[in-house]
Amino acid sequence: MEIVLIIAVVIALAVGLALVGLLDRRPAPPKHAYPEVRDADDPEPGGSHAAVLEQDPDTAAAVDQDVDGTPVEEEAAEPQVQLERPEAAGTRLQRLRARLLKSNNVFGKGLLALLSRDTIDEEVWDEVEETLLMADLGTEPTLELVERLRDRVRVEGTQDADQVRAMLREELLTMVDPSMDRRLEASRKGDRPAITMVVGVNGVGKTTTVGKLARVLVAEDRRVVLGAADTFRAAAAEQLATWGARVGVDTVRSEKEGADPASVAFEAVDEGIRQEADVVLVDTAGRLQNKANLMDELGKIKRVIEKRGEVDEVLLVLDATTGQNGLNQAKVFAEVVDVTGIVLTKLDGTAKGGIVVAIQRELGVPVKLVGLGEGPDDLAPFTAEGFVDALLAE
């Protein structure tokens, strides 16, 4: 009986060993077709907890296939943003002159008609004076121009339309003053960019003007950085960033409404230095509740900027349709900051051409840029000759 039990155990062991051998000869299950992703909580050999993507070299080709073996299409690359190419200055000037002619032809034609009469008496001179005043030329410039025209008509004694036009052109050109330096500071100053502050009250199109000015500079192949230092108007920074993005210009801004504008301006200049930009344009808030607040804010922005570099240009944006009210605004800003140039917007429509002379006389600084429309490239460098010729063209 004991012999029978021993034989049974031996047989059982033999069968068991045979089964184990068969199992060892089965093919190993295939590795998964997708790379192993280590859990973020699993420590790396170096001690980090970053997610790591591991891939078996034998199954690398399988990564681009779905479970059923269907090739997985590669994700389409994001389309590149097509940057706009702004118009060159020459094209702008031709179009702007045409619009100026259309909106101000009453000014030129009225004067030419008066000065071409057979008899020019005191009544005619009164009408000439009234026409000039209505064109926003200002009282002092009007009296000066009428006096000079009187002298020339008395000496030359002509009513020929062409001669009168030539005479009027010469006198108006003298009033607009072609000798004024209307160049923009738009070149690097040693190891830093030129720095321009743009100031003006809300509603004159200041932020839009900064965006359009960036386009003028980009058209001249200048590298530009924008600073959205108008932090008190929620839409200002977004609006400026949109203008910049259209032509590939970076905008430095604060995500926090009401942030310190001087800090944003400082960071914009720093970014301009880092990018080796040609120009940094800083948009500022346009609040004019009282002169003291304005002086404090603009003064602080300028002082903080000048820790990194001198402010080379302060452009004052004025709405040409506001007439004498615009002059009053200009006086306040001129007392607060050292204005170096005027940007005159909305010179089409109801604006009067004489405002150019009045502003320059009042502030002693030149009009450097003019805007004559709502288009992105409806801002152009101002030229005295082009302006006067547009006023007197038929």
Image: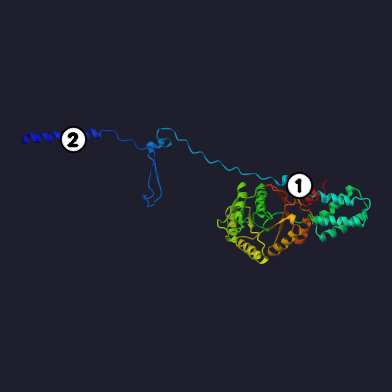
Tell me whether circle 1 and circle 2 mark residues in contact (CB < 8 Å).
Answer: no
Quadrant where the C terminus sits is top right
Percent across and percent down for residue 340 are: 71, 59
| Mark found first going from the N terminus, 1 or 2 | 2
Residue sitting nearer the eye, 260 or 383: 260
Identified by mark 2, the residue type is Gly
Please give left or right for residue 349 compared with residue 45 in the image.
right
User: Of helix, strand and loop, which one carries label 1?
Assistant: helix
Residue sitting nearer the eye, 224 or 213: 213
Location of residue 150 with respect to 19 vertically, above or below: below
Nearer the observer: mark 1 or 2; the answer is: 1
Tell me which residue sits at (65%, 51%) in the image.
211
Query: What is the CA distance from the residue labelled 1 to the residue labelled 2?
Result: 103 Å
Circle count: 2
**Res 380 visible:** yes
Tell me which residue sits at (58%, 43%) in the image.
81
Percent across and percent down for residue 295 are: 66, 65
Residue sitting nearer the eye, 280 or 388: 388
Location of residue 37 with respect to 138 vertically, above or below: above
| Residue 16: image tag | 2
Question: Pointer 1: what residue?
Answer: 99
User: Of helix, strand and loop, which one carries label 2?
Assistant: helix
| Residue that sits furthest to the bottom in the current view | 292
Applied colour scheme: rainbow
Percent across and percent down for residue 199 are: 67, 58
